[in-house]
Image: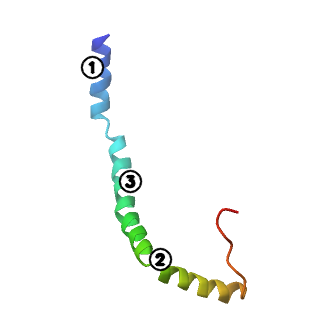
Amino acid sequence: MLKKLREKLQALHKDEGGADMVEYILLVALVGLPLLALIWVFRDKVLAWANQYWEQLVGNVAPPTQGG
C-alpha cells in the first residue's frame, strides 16, 4: 500500500502539466491586479469617462443600476 502511494507521489512530482497552468495564472494576475488597482484608484475619473461615452451612445438616459 505504501509502495503504491509512493509511486503515485513520484508520478505527481514528475508531472509538469500543472506548472503551465500556474504560470498562466501568475501571468494573468501580473497583468490583471495592477489594472484593477489603477481602476480602483481612478474610479471617479473612470466613471465620469464611462458616463460621458454612455450619454453619447444612448442619449441622456441613466446607465443601468447594479443589483437589478
Q: Is residue 27 above or below residue 22?
A: below
- Going from N to C along the chain, the mark reached first, 3 or 1, is 1
- The residue under label 3 is which amino acid type? Ile
Q: Is residue 45 above or below residue 39?
A: below
Q: CA distance from mark 3 to mark 2?
A: 25 Å
Q: CA distance from mark 3 to mark 1?
A: 29 Å
Q: Nearer the viewer, mark 3 or mark 2?
A: 2
Nearest the camera: 33 or 17?
A: 33
- Figure disc tally: 3
Q: Which residue is mark 1?
A: 6
Element class at badge 3: helix
- The image's mark for residue 43 is 2
- The residue under label 1 is which amino acid type? Arg
- The residue under label 2 is which amino acid type? Arg
Within the image, what quadrant is residue 12 found in?
top left
Q: Position of residue 51 (x, y in %)?
A: 60, 83
Q: Which residue is mark 3?
A: 25
Q: Nearer the viewer, mark 3 or mark 1?
A: 3
Q: Position of residue 63 (x, y in %)?
A: 67, 77
* Neighbourhood count class around disc 2 (C-alpha, 10 Å): few under 14, some 14–19, many 20 upward: few
Q: Name the residue located 66 percent from the left edge and 89 percent from the top edge.
A: 56
Q: Name the residue located 28 percent from the left edge and 12 percent from the top edge.
A: 2
Q: CA distance from mark 2 to mark 1?
A: 52 Å
* Neighbourhood count class around disc 3 (C-alpha, 10 Å): few under 14, some 14–19, many 20 upward: few
Are the two marked residues, 2 and 1, in contact with CB atoms closer than 8 angstroms? no
Q: Is residue 14 above or below residue 22?
A: above
Nearest the camera: 17 or 41?
A: 41
Q: Nearer the viewer, mark 2 or mark 1?
A: 2
Nearest the camera: 4 or 55?
A: 55
Query: Quarter holding the N terminus?
Result: top left
Are the two marked residues, 3 and 1, in contact with CB atoms closer than 8 angstroms? no
In the figure, is residue 51 to the left or right of 35?
A: right
